[in-house]
Image (tube, helix red, strand yellow):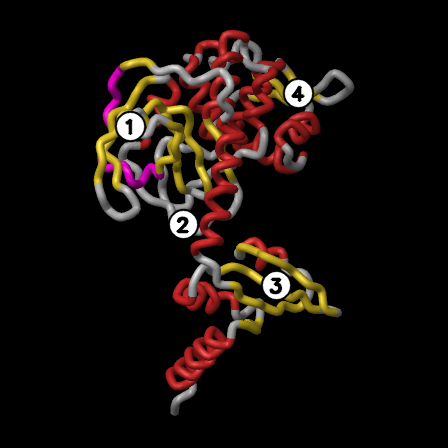
Amino acid sequence: MRVHRLIAILLLIESRGKMKASALAEALETSVRSIYRDIDVLAESGIPLCTTTGPGGGISLMEGYTVNLRRLHGEEVVQLFLTGMGMPAEMTGESSLLLTNALLKLEATLPAPYLQDIRTARNRFLFDTAPWWDEQAILPCLETLRAAVWRGTKLKVLYRKVNGDMSHRSLHPYGLVVKQGAWYLVAYCESALEVRTFKCERFASVEGSGENCTIPDDFSLQQYWSESNKTFMDNSKTREFYPVVLRTQGYNQELLNQLEVLATEHARTELIITANMYDYETACAKVLPLLVQAEILEPLPLRDYIAMQIRTWQNIYLCD
C-alpha cells in the first residue's frame, strides 16, 4: 500500500507543481507525519524533491526533473489505477492491495487524454471489499480476462461447473469483480442468452477471439453485482441455514466482521449474536478459533462437539 502512495505523491506533485504536506495528507487520507516519512523515502531513492517553507512554500520536484506523467501510455495509467483499486498484475498470497481513494482522486489532475480511460475503468472494474468465505486461488487466465474486459473483445472459454462438468462457452465480457481475493467475470453468455457471473478460478482455458463486443448503454456493473450478490446470499441462506448463537463480553466488531450475522441482542454488558454457519460441519470448522472471543450457546450438538474437542486437548496438553 505504501508503494502506491509513493507513486501517488509523485503524480500529485508533478501534476500540480507544488503541494504542501498537509494537502498531500488530505488527498491521500493519511497523516502529515506519514507524508514526511514518504518524502524521505523518495529522496533517499534518488528523487530530487525540494521543500520550501512559508505561505507559498510546499514540496516540489527539482526544476527540470519529471516523472514523465505526460509520457505514460493510456493503458499504463489505467494499470496504475487498477493496482490502486486492489487489482495487482499478479495475485500472490495476501497481496490484496487497496489504496484508499488516492488514485481515484488523481482523475482530476491527470492530463485530458487519460480522463476517458480512467472513467471507463471505473465503470468496467469493481473492487468489492465486503467479507466472503472463500480462499484466494491462482488464476493463470487473469491477464487474458482483464485484457478482454478492457478492450471489449469476445472470449471462448472452457468452464467448470459446480458439479465438475465442463462446458464450452462464448462470452461477451462486461466486467471483473474482486471480492476478498476471489475474482468473478460478469459476461453475456451466448448459449444462455443472458448476463451471468463466472468464478474465474473455474476457467480451465480462456482464449481471446479478437472479435469486438458491445456493452449495452444501460448496463451498470455496480447495480448488476449488488442485485446478483443479494440473490446469491438469499439463495444460500435458504439452502444452507445453520444458526449458531454466541455470547461475547461487550461489543466486538472484530468478531462481527468474521460472521454472517443474522441478529444481535444486548444483555447488560454482553452481546448475544446469532450467525449463520450454513451446516454442522462448517460450524465445527469455524467455531474453534472463535472460542477465545465468545461462548457458543446454541445449538447443543455444536456445544457437545466443542466439549469433546476440549477434552481431547486436555488429554494432550495436561497429561503427566
Q: Position of residue 244 (x, y in %)?
A: 53, 66
First in sequence: mark 3 vs mark 2: 2
Of tags 4 and 3, which is closer to the observer? 3
Q: Which residues are magenta?
A: 199-210
Q: Which mark is residue 147?
A: none
Give how far apart the Cα atoms at labels 3 and 2 are. 22 Å
User: Callout 4: helix, strand or loop?
Assistant: strand
Q: Residue at x 43, y 68 (%)?
A: 284
Reading the image, the residue beneath label 4 is 19
Front one among 163 and 178 = 163
User: Callout 3: helix, strand or loop?
Assistant: strand
**Whether residue 53 is situated above or below residue 312 in the rendered picture:** above
Reading the image, the residue beneath label 3 is 273
Left of 91 or right of it: where is 161?
Answer: left
Give how far apart the Cα atoms at labels 4 and 3 are. 48 Å
Give how far apart the Cα atoms at labels 1 and 4 are. 54 Å
